[in-house]
Amino acid sequence: MVEFKITFECWKKPVSKKNKMKFNRRHGRAYKDPSVREFEEWLHEEALQEKRKWEQLTCYEWKQDQKYKLSVVVVAGTRRRFDIQNVFDTICDSLQGVFYEDDSQIVEISGKKTYEQGAKDRFSIYIEIV
């Protein structure tokens, strides 16, 4: 039996959407800051590569119509303050269309943020079908 779970690490500082949403004064619509959009596009591509590697290794196709468990571990090299909940929002949006059709399919989430002095900013993603 194949285990439908993937873990991968990204060596980049995760971006939070909070306080980075912009509003068009003329139309009043919200839009994403370019840094958020770039991060989401980058993570989407990284996730696609990880999914392809998993599919080649297992010879199975990842199922997008299931319920999922998502876990994120963020390691910061500085003691800056950030809200892990807002990081989740950005990561969930980035993984949409790769591992699941809509982030409402995520039924369990967990997160952890740690500090390692002098370490490079990074985060790990663990996703599995429940």
Image: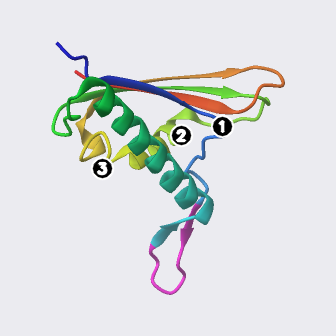
Say what secondary structure mark 2 lies in: helix
Mark carried by residue 87 = 2
- Residue toward you, 68 or 52: 52
Colour mode?
rainbow
What residue type is disc 2 on? Answer: Val
Q: Spot the residue most to the right.
A: 118
For image coordinates 60% across by 36% down, the residue present is 83
Q: Residues within 10 Å of mark 1 (few under 14, many from 20)?
A: some
The N terminus sits in image quarter:
top left
Is residue 9 rendered to the left or right of residue 80? left
Inspect the magenta stretch and tell me whether residue 52 lies in it: no
Residue 129 visible, this angle: yes
Magenta: main secondary structure = loop
Residue 39 in percent (x, y) is at 56, 52
For image coordinates 35% across by 38% down, the residue present is 52
Q: Residues within 10 Å of mark 2 (few under 14, many from 20)?
A: some
Q: CB under 8 Å between callouts 2 and 1?
A: yes
Q: CA distance from mark 3 to mark 1?
A: 26 Å
**Mark 2 vs mark 1: which is more N-terminal?**
1
For image coordinates 25% across by 17% down, the residue present is 3
Mark carried by residue 82 = 1
Residue 122 in percent (x, y) is at 64, 32
What residue type is disc 1 on? Answer: Phe
Bounds of the magenta span? 21-29
Residue 81 in percent (x, y) is at 71, 35
Kindly report which numbered mark, 2 or 1, lies closer to the viewer in this rendering: 2
Say what secondary structure mark 3 lies in: loop
Above or below, 29 against 129 in this view is below
Q: Which residue is mark 3?
A: 97
Q: Quadrant of residue 56?
A: top left
